[in-house]
Image (spheres, rainbow, N blue to C red):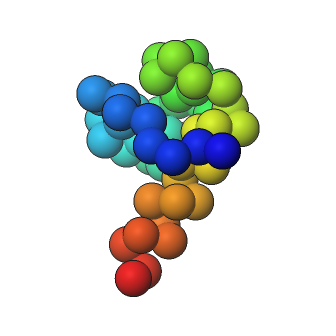
Amino acid sequence: MLEYIDVENWDVVYAQWKAQDITADEAAVKLGISKATLYRMEKRMKMAKDK
């Protein structure tokens, strides 16, 4: 189970991905995680923001 992943440049890479400057595959590679983990982190970030 994913508890927390500390990714230094998450905010920068996430912004690039959401702006469609890079693909999900490229974002995952830049962050050193799998694409599934990228989507999981995005989901958890959105859930935390909605609380």
Q: Residue furthest right?
A: 36
Q: In this rendering, would 51 be left or right of 43?
A: left
Q: Nearer the viewer, residue 16 or 36?
A: 36
Q: Residue furthest bottom?
A: 51
Examine the rendered structure and indicate whether residue 17 appears above or below residue 49: above
For the point 63% across and 37% down, the residue is 37
What x and y, as percent, mark residue 49? 37, 72
Examine the rendered structure and indicate whether residue 32 appears above or below residue 15: above
User: Where is residue 7, by image quadrant?
Assistant: top left
What x and y, as percent, mark residue 27? 53, 28
What x and y, as percent, mark residue 6? 35, 33
For the point 51% across and 46% down, the residue is 3
Q: In this rendering, would 43 be left or right of 13?
A: right
What x and y, as percent, mark residue 21? 47, 34
Asked if residue 16 can be seen in this view, the reply is no
Examine the rendered structure and indicate whether residue 48 appears above or below residue 14: below
Examine the rendered structure and indicate whether residue 13 appears above or below residue 3: above
Q: Quadrant of the C terminus?
A: bottom left
Asked if residue 38 can be seen in this view, the reply is yes
For the point 31% across and 41% down, the residue is 11
Q: Quadrant of the N terminus?
A: top right
